[in-house]
Every structure is written in C-alpha cells, then in structure tokens.
Amino acid sequence: MAEREVDRSVSQTVKAQLALRDQILSGALRPGERISELQAVETTGASRTPVRMALVRLEEEGLLEAIPSGGFMVKAFSERDISDSIELRGTLEGLAARFAAERGVSARELEPLKECLAAIDELLRQVPISIEAFSSYVALNARFHALLTELSRSPPLIRQIDRASALPFASPSGFVMAQSALPEAQQILIIGQEHHRVVIDAIENREGARAEAIMREHARLAVRNLRLALRNRTHLDLLPALALIKTATD
Amino acid sequence: MAEREVDRSVSQTVKAQLALRDQILSGALRPGERISELQAVETTGASRTPVRMALVRLEEEGLLEAIPSGGFMVKAFSERDISDSIELRGTLEGLAARFAAERGVSARELEPLKECLAAIDELLRQVPISIEAFSSYVALNARFHALLTELSRSPPLIRQIDRASALPFASPSGFVMAQSALPEAQQILIIGQEHHRVVIDAIENREGARAEAIMREHARLAVRNLRLALRNRTHLDLLPALALIKTATD
DNA sequence: ACCTCCGTTATTGTATACATAACGTATTCA
DNA sequence: TGAATACGTTATGTATACAATAACGGAGGT
C-alpha cells in the first residue's frame, strides 16, 4: 500500500480539518454533497480516526451537517441564512461593545484599536484603493473586530462571536470581500470606518447603548450591501466562500 | 414493527456523550479536573473511538476545554461567566423575538405559545406552588422559550441559541431552578410570566423593538435573581449544574 | 541539598481491522 | 413488464493495536 508521508509538525486531526475546510470553501465539495470518509482519507493524507474527528469539528463549526443515516454532507445556505448570520454577529458584537463601554476600558487597552483605526484611515486616503491596500484593509478590519470583541472581557461572549464568525460569509473579512464587488465599494468602506470611529468614541465615553447601536447598524449596512452584491452575480466568483449558497430555492 | 430495545438502539457515541455529560453535571467530575480517556471508557462502557468523539462534541458544547498538551479537562466558570451567558442568551432570544415580530407570524403558529402561557397561568394560580407544579413549570417554560426561538424562522439563529443554551446554567430550566432557591421565587415566576405575555403581544402587533426589549429585560431579571441565589449558598445544592462554578477566584 | 538528566510509565494520537447497516442491482415471481 | 425481494457491495460505526509524547521518578553529579 501507498507510503503515507507523515508530517509531524501539526497533528493529523488539525491537518485534516484545514484540508477539508479548504475543499469546502474552495468549492471542490459542493453544498449538499455527501463527504465520503474514504475519499477524505485519500485527499487529506490522514487516516480515518483524525478525519472523523475533523468531520465532527467541522459539523460543530457549521460547515457540515450530519446525515441521519450516517456520515456528513456539506451544508447549504440560503441568502436569508447568510444575512441572518451577519445580523446575528452584529448583535453579538453590539453586546461586546456595550460590555466594554459599561465595564470600562483603560486608555492602554484602547490603544491598539486606535492604531488600527489610523492605519485604515491611511489606506482609505488612496482613491481608488489598490488591490494590495484593499487586502491590508481586510486584515486590519478583521483585527479591529477581534480587538473590539476582546474588550468585552467576557469569555463566553468571545467564544460565541468566534463561533458566529466561523461561517466564512459571516466573518468580518467575508462580508467586506463580498461588498468589494459593488461599484460603491470605496464609499462603503468609508462609512464602515466611521462606524468604527463612533464605537470607540462611545466606549471611551462609557455610552453602552450607543456603542451597541452603532455595531448593530454596522452589521445592517453589511447586510444591505451583501444583498446588493448578490444581485450582481457576475462578481460572485470573487468570493469563493459564497459557493456555499444553495443555487436552487431560497 | 416491534423493535427489540437493546443498547444498540442508540449509538455508542451518543451513549458516551450523555454519560459523560451526566458525570460532569452531577459533579462526579470536578471543574478543572482532567478527563482520562481510559477512565471514561470504563465508566461509559463504550470504546475509545466513540469516547473521543463524545469528548470533541462536549468541548464544542462548552462543557470541556482542550488541554494544550493533549486531552480535555472539565471547564470551570466564574459567576461573571454565568451571568454573561444568561445575558447572551437573552440577547439572542431578543433577536429571535424581533425577527418573529418583523417577519410576521400567523395566528396558527402563535397558538402553541398561547397554550403554554395559559398552562403556566394555571400552575401559578396555586399559592404556594407545589413541587410537582414547579417541575411542570420548568418544562413548560423551556417549551415556551423553544417555541419562541422557532418563530424566528432563522436556522442560524436557532442553532446559535441552542448552543448558548448548552451550558446548563444558561438554559431556561437552569436559571429558573437557580431562582427557585430564593424566598421570592413565586413572585419572580409571576413577573417572568408577565414578560412572556408581553412578548407575545408585541409579536402579534408586529412591534419588533418592543419584543426584543422585553426578552432582554427577561434575561436581566434572571441575572439579578441568579446573583441573589448565589449569595444564598445554602441552597446551592438544589442545582447540581452549578457545581461547574469555580470555587476559588472569580 | 538541590538540580539535572535519563529512563520508565502512563496517556494521548494515529492507524487499521472488524462488524454492521444502508444502498444498489439483479433476478424472479406475479 | 413491473415490482419486490434477496444478495452483494460499499461505507460508516466500533474496537483495538501500535506509536509517540509528555509526565513522573530515581539516580547521579555539582
């Protein structure tokens, strides 16, 4: 039988999980398609036990769905599912912002957020924004959201937000990229940045309700824009993660 | 169609998961304690593979925590973690109520909710409430919350709420039981019932914001009362699930 | 006496063999 | 000819054997 070259630097379970997630997100495995363990063993290079562990984790993550008769299939999402996921994440981030504001945050903790803000400002000064700058923006934006989440100092909430961001289209990077297909992309980024600025201000002034409201508005903007982007199906291939949308009925 | 009811009617994985969860919630495994796979194999009767799958699921569920060097330990929670989890669930249920109100719900769909409401009303008419009636109340209350969640018609949100309810103290039954240790228990139940009534009214009248607000208030009430109940440590043994609280530092 | 290093042990990570249930196909009977 | 059943194939669920690694303890050196 074929020699299995063992990569001992990472656990086989993690390797299999990453490989399978890649296959799902890249569209190599289509929504609704059943995942064969045997096939997964071949493509990932791990054996059945770690592959099974990876499948269980991906199911909990929301990318897979258990089939009653056994095994797993790639989950399919409707547009409604996607917009709900984004609004859900916005609600959770709103709670995080409120916690941060109510519980109080020191100037030192706010520092990295402000640096993020300034860096994004710098990027947005270019008109139109270059591809490289946009890529930096995606990373910085994700970092901003992660830092903001941390400010809540609430492990259960942080955990839940992480889970809600597991779905690629619901992650900060995910919907920013989806919006990038729109002609008004630059203006959208500028508005988003304004939201970031306001939430920091609200947290500094300990205005919990305002901090929460602006994060929810931030998400609603994303939902509106994603809907628009989905109308322009021509640009859809920009975001491979959207391959998870079920093409048939909504 | 008479199926023989053998142990094989449920999978070994599920059996192990239930058994382990029982051990954790009953306090047989203490917070912070490492779970030995070998020991779990002996106590659950399943072999290592299903036990491992169960451990992964329980980790994703939030009851266990992965140890970097390998294996799992029982997660420990602070009081803050618990109150945050309850508020988190309330926020999610608030969103569900808002979705239900905004999206519209037919009278037929609202029927089971109203039946629940009436049944609880009936129970609360007794003063003081009997043990049996209280037990029925716990079940009915859980059912009410589950039905309300369903009304959102949002699979991602429903899923997330289920996850948030996985932690025993964050589940509807969990915090109702914790509150039962208080002398004002009956009054608390009556207030809670009033919240239930208002949220239905708001949904019927399609007042999304009001539906959301009342559910969040519902959770805040629970948080306040749980804090009070935790002060009365004498009654704490009423709720085995609270064994998960770390006794040392907060 | 304490620290360090090495060997032993126990426990987890991985692989594979075995059992069982589901699905497809072919054959047979109505 | 169609449907139903039986059989075979395939894939999943389960168990166990093997490998590797981290914890533990003892012995020796500084």
Image (cartoon, coloured by chain):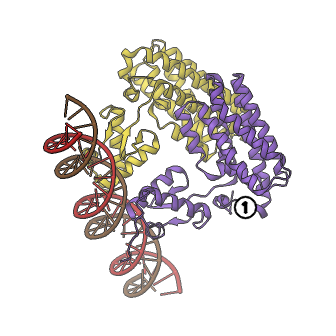
Chain colours: A purple, B yellow, C brown, D red
Locate residue A121: give its quadrant: top right
Q: Chain of mark 1?
A: A
Q: Is residue A119 left or right of residue A184?
A: left
**Which image quarter holds the C terminus of chain B?**
top left
Can residue B206 be seen here? no
Can residue B117 be seen here? yes
Give B236 or B124, whichever is nearer the viewer.
Answer: B236
The residue identified by callout 1 is A238
Q: Amino acid at mark 1?
A: Leu
Q: Is residue A16 left or right of residue A90?
A: left
Element marked by disc 1:
helix
Residue depicted at x 52% and y 23%: B122
Give B127 or A21, whichever is nearer the viewer.
Answer: A21
Q: Count how many numbered circles sit on residues in the image.
A: 1
**Which image quarter holds the N terminus of chain B?**
bottom left
Measuring from the top left, give residue A228's x and y in whole percent. Answer: 80, 53
Outermost residue, top side? B183
Measuring from the top left, give residue B222's x and y in whole percent. Answer: 54, 22
Q: Is residue A240 above or below residue B217?
A: below
Locate residue A28: give its quadrant: bottom right
Give A85 or A2, whichever is nearer the viewer.
Answer: A2
Measuring from the top left, give residue B107's x and y in whole percent. Answer: 67, 38
Q: Residues within 10 Å of mark 1 (few under 14, many from 20)?
A: few
Give A142 or A73, whichever is nearer the viewer.
Answer: A142
Residue depicted at x 70% and y 49%: A138
Q: Is residue A44 above or below residue B48?
A: below
Residue depicted at x 70% and y 53%: A79
Measuring from the top left, give residue B177's x and y in whole percent. Answer: 44, 24
Q: Is residue B151 above or below residue B245?
A: below
